[in-house]
Amino acid sequence: MIEVRGLTKRYGAVTAVDDLTFDVAPGKVTGFLGPNGAGKSTTMRMILGLDRPTSGSALVGGRPFPRLAEPLRAAGALLDAGAVHPGRSGRDHLRVAARTHGIPLRRVDEVIDQVGLGPAARRRVKGYSLGMRQRLGIATALIGDPAVLLFDEPMNGLDLDGVRWIRRLVRGLADEGRTVLLSSHLMSEMEQTADHLVIIGRGRLIADASFQEVMRGQGSGRKVRVRTPSTDQLAGALLRRGAVVHPSGDGELLVEGVTAEVVGDVALEEAVAVHRLAEEHSSLEQIYLDLTGDSVQYRVAGAPELVAQR
Amino acid sequence: MTAVAVREPGTPAVFGRAAAAEWLRLRTVRTTWWCLLAAAVTIVGIGVIMAYDADDVYATGELPPATAAGEFGVMLGQFALLVLVLLAVTQEYASGAITPTLQWTPRRGLLLAARLTVPVLAATAAGVLLALTADITAWLIADLPFSPGDVADSLGRVAAVLLAGGALAVGVGLLLRSTAGALATVFLLQLVLPFLLPAFGVQWMADLGELLPGTGAIWMLLGEPDMTAGQATALLVGWAALAVGLGGASLLRRDAG
């Protein structure tokens, strides 16, 4: 269980995290989504007491993380896979972690096996690939067998195998009843992973709902795509029914505000041929873009129009 | 995953673990061993050279005590040991390893205590052992006067210099967080300025030089310049306390890194 209450972080005039309040429940994978620069990492760092909040608080298992005597038994985290002394072997890195908690050496080798680091664990970290560093970071997070896990962009830079492995891992951890907070800037990474979504943009909370609720919440703006040789006639009739109609080229119309049934009925009344009729479900990416569209901090000039057209 | 009510270890136990982890950190990077090798070569090497030089001056009747070998050796070789201590602090900021470190030991006061204790004591112990080795080498090779009393007194002063210098290095490292910046600062305060400032022959520069920690260290090891043991001790302790105070405040208050 993670409880975030009014968490705020300002750097001078810049507000990186703005009055965030949310809970992360056990037994689920909670996706922590937001565009780059939205404040995900800063929030995670504040939960772990690494960065000091300007105001607000965060509790891990009911207590502030920086006061814990055995923090690794409460929460494990992978924040930045590169943040390891390059000259130390992966196994030694884990041994240091274990020693801060009196964890036996046997557990070090257990987590090395669990993440599949194998013999590479005895090599120095400077020779590790990104994937190996991620695995080492995850082994470090798991070493204290914690009830809470935080992973910051764990799939970044991984190949497909690595991504699948992480998906299975976080699913397994949540199924064991642990609290899992998994950040990403890509909605697609969440599709097969997250049960619950906390979406932020420019440091503010945009959505805190189950995956299905987020999908459904955006479903009200469902669109219908219809292809007809008589676009003008059908568009006129639909407009009279109060629909919003966007011509989308090649004899197709994108209709908002009415269902596919209504479009079909109107076409029948108007005796207009219909070559295709389909409800358009917003894609995950589209929902995400719609939600965070206003909050994207760094955007290429001209890109907003692109978002609007889609 | 229900929270099992396990009794948490008390502060002394948490400090013990943090210190044990710090010791493991030191041992598991090659830098430490390179620094020790450099210190051994410098301290004992200078000691041996001292011994041969003393052999030359033997005919003049002037014979330095064997302890001069260890003291001259440490005057230069202390820097390899201070680099060892400094890197234990700043390398974590360079690599980002301070992030996991503070996740494992989030009680920053305890981390400061462990980081101050273990690397500084390790460097001091190494320095004292190497100084003793230099003394014995000088005694065996050059037959310099060697008395246990002298040696104990000399090693005590060597230890004082290394403890204070180590604390200075930890403090400056925590404050500046950059290896290059901290290294330059410690070198300037401990060696370069104390020797350089009086050399200009300008009074205020010489006076300024006498306020630096390195002047206290030079007095401890070489008996120069003219000051009392109390003044030299005040310089060493004062600067170490100032650096640890500022660096410690930085660790406790600033974001992790």
Image (cartoon, grey):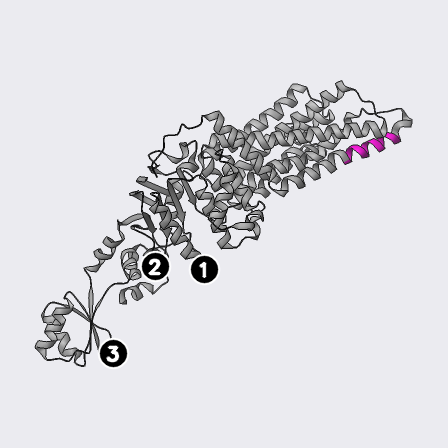
Residue A282 location, x and y as percent? 25, 63
| CA separation in Å, label 2 and label 3 | 29 Å
Q: Start and end of the magenta stretch?
A: B45-56
Residue at 80% of width from left, 30% of height from top?
B137
Q: Are circles 2 and 3 on residues that touch, CB within 8 Å? A: no
Query: Which residue is the site of mark 2?
Result: A188
Q: Are circles 2 and 1 on residues that touch, CB within 8 Å? A: no
Q: Amino acid at mark 1?
A: Asp
Residue B94 location, x and y as percent? 54, 45
Query: Which is in the foreground here, disc 2 or disc 1?
Result: 1
Query: Which residue is the site of mark 3?
Result: A250
Specify the quadrant that holds the C terminus of chain A: bottom left
- Sequence-wise first label, 2 or 3: 2
Q: Main secondary structure of the magenta part?
A: helix
Kindly tell me whether residue A253 is visible in this rendering: yes
- Sequence-wise first label, 2 or 1: 1
**Above-or-below relation of A51 to A156:** above
Query: Which is in the foreground here, disc 2 or disc 3?
Result: 2
**Above-or-below relation of A104 to B145:** below
Labels 3, 1: one chain: yes
Chain letter belonging to callout 1: A
Label 1: few (<14), some (14–19) or many (≥20) C-alpha neighbours in 10 Å? few
Q: Amino acid at mark 3?
A: Asp
Q: Secondary structure at mark 3?
A: loop
Instruction: Tell me which corner region of the image, top left, top right, bottom left or bottom right, holds residue A255.
Output: bottom left
Residue at 60% of width from left, 24% of height from top?
B237
Query: Which residue is the site of mark 1?
Result: A159
Labels 2, 3: one chain: yes
Kindly tell me whether residue B212 is visible in this rendering: no
The question of residue B54 being in magenta is answered with yes
